[in-house]
Image (cartoon, rainbow, N blue to C red):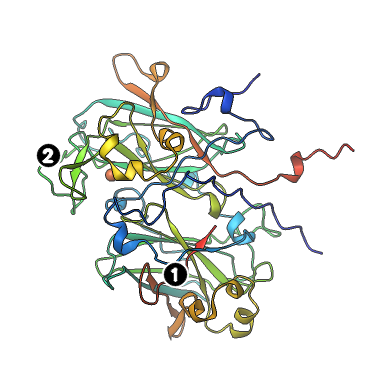
Amino acid sequence: MTEQSVSGQPVSEQSVSGRRPLGLTPSQTVGPFLSLGLPWPDGGDVVAEGTDGAIRIGGVVRDGAGEVVPDALVETWQADPEGNFDHPDSAERSTFRGFGRCPTDGDGHWEIRTLKPGAVDGQAPHVDVSVFARGLLDRVVTRIYFPDEEAANAADPVLATVPADRRATLVATATAPAELRFDITLRGNDETVFFQV
Amino acid sequence: MTRARPAPFTPPPDGTHPPLDYAAYRSTGLRAPSQPPIVLPHRLTEVTGPLLGAERIGPSDHDLTAQHAGEPIGQRIIVSGRVLDSDGRPVPDTLVEVWQANAAGRYAHARDNWPAPLDPNFTGGGRVVTDSSGNYSFTTIRPGAYPWGNHHNAWRPAHIHFSLFGTAFTQRLVTQMYFPDDPLFDQDPIFNSVPDPKARERMISRFDLDATRAEWALAFRWDIVLRGREQTPFEEPHDD
Ligand SMILES: [Fe+2]
């Protein structure tokens, strides 16, 4: 056998592909001090300032008491305007970064500058979102859809699985030209729809 | 037909990840969603993800003891291990981000103000990238335990926060690495939020004599396992 030992797992339980899978490392909360390790100076710049067609998407993260959450981190992942990703599984590989990351500020606000994604794989244009915070033992995942895509949203296979009266929490609001608002409510009234991935 | 949809990632076994709603950790009360999550089948957005690597690493990011003019106080340690998926495949060239308290258990953060000393030579943030075999390694000081307001006389066991991306949105993981034989495990709701005791143990590093450096540093080893793919067409032999 050439199996290498995996720390924390007895060799008898360790697998190479096709056999019994290795046990996963559990999730733990980011805690209140994530700003020591996670934010990047250019985290919110999915595209650089001045990029043609750039839009801003941002909003406020709130808790179940309606208070703003000043210690969360919002991460985004999306296709480029043609629906391609900078990833080998994409039919055509894009050079678009596609990834955004922004800690909330003292007012619970986050924001990214990006390009509107194209349709992906028969779905309406969307941005996948992870939210991390103290009090979240695992990330929560949601999706941003676009308000000017009514027909595509109506035909989207993921939105179709969401109860109709909660779908609006997944659609951003246009607040100005090239500016969209997407608030995230972790719990309570108007709770954002979260997904299990 | 266009390309076949890439294989989804296997769901985590029950008991591996903590429930979001976990009353013993009080901050979950106002932050954990009240509605059950809706299952999102993996499509292209979920099976892809940012491939972050060396371009995100600064010159002293791998050595948290070398980020200031002087050396931080504390026990110098080397933390190393491998990043794998659940099929045992290494995850090469992937970004690993860490942050931690100083040796006295205090974070260099404006909102951490319990009366333990700050260390002017320690910030506590680091970044490394795995090599072609999935190995990572960084140098730091052993963090201290710290009190928090969760319940009377609550103390967090010493830990280092870890953030990993893997190669897909579904593999994203933020976790904490603990140290062997910590007497504070039993009273810590964050550690104990993981339901499966075996999964809990996988968050504990082990002392690694082989990786110590004589006259310099002790060492701990911690391997991290991310979700694997349900099936990999390339590896399914069709020899019938
Ligand atoms: Fe911590």
Residue B117: mark: 2
Q: Position of residue A120 (x, y in %)?
A: 65, 68
Name the spot of residue B1 as percent of width and height, x first. 82, 64
Q: Residue at x 49, y 63 (%)?
A: B37
B226 w.r.t. B71: above or below: below
Q: Return the residue nearer the eye: B62 or A172.
A: A172
Q: Secondary structure at mark 1?
A: strand
Which of the 4 image quadrants contains residue A11? Answer: top right
**Residue found at x 58% / y 82%:** A149
- Quarter of the render that holds ligand 1: top left
**The C terminus of chain A lies in which quarter of the figure?**
bottom right
Q: Position of residue B198 (x, y in %)?
A: 45, 34
Local packing at callout 2 (Cα closer than 10 Å; few below 14, some 14-19, many 20+) is some
Q: Is mark 1 within 8 Å of ligand 1?
A: no
Calculate the distance from the C-alpha at mark 2 to the C-alpha at mark 1: 39 Å
For the N terminus of chain A, which image quadrant?
Answer: top right
View extreme (left): residue: B115
Which of A25 and B193 lies nearest the eye of the viewer? B193
* Image location (x, y in percent) of residue A54: 49, 74
Residue receiving disc 1: A113
Mark 2 residue type:
Pro
> Callout 1: residue from which chain?
A
Disc 1: CA contacts within 10 A as few (<14), some (14-19) or many (>=20): many
Question: Which numbered disc covers residue B155?
Answer: none
Q: Amino acid type of disc 1?
A: Arg
Q: Which residue is located at x 56 percent, y 35 percent?
A: A22
Residue B68, quarter of the rendered image: top left
Task: Specify whether residue B122 is in view.
Answer: yes
Confirm if mark 2 falls within 8 A of ligand 1: no
Callout 2 secondary element: loop
Q: Are marks 2 and 1 in contact (CB under 8 Å)?
A: no
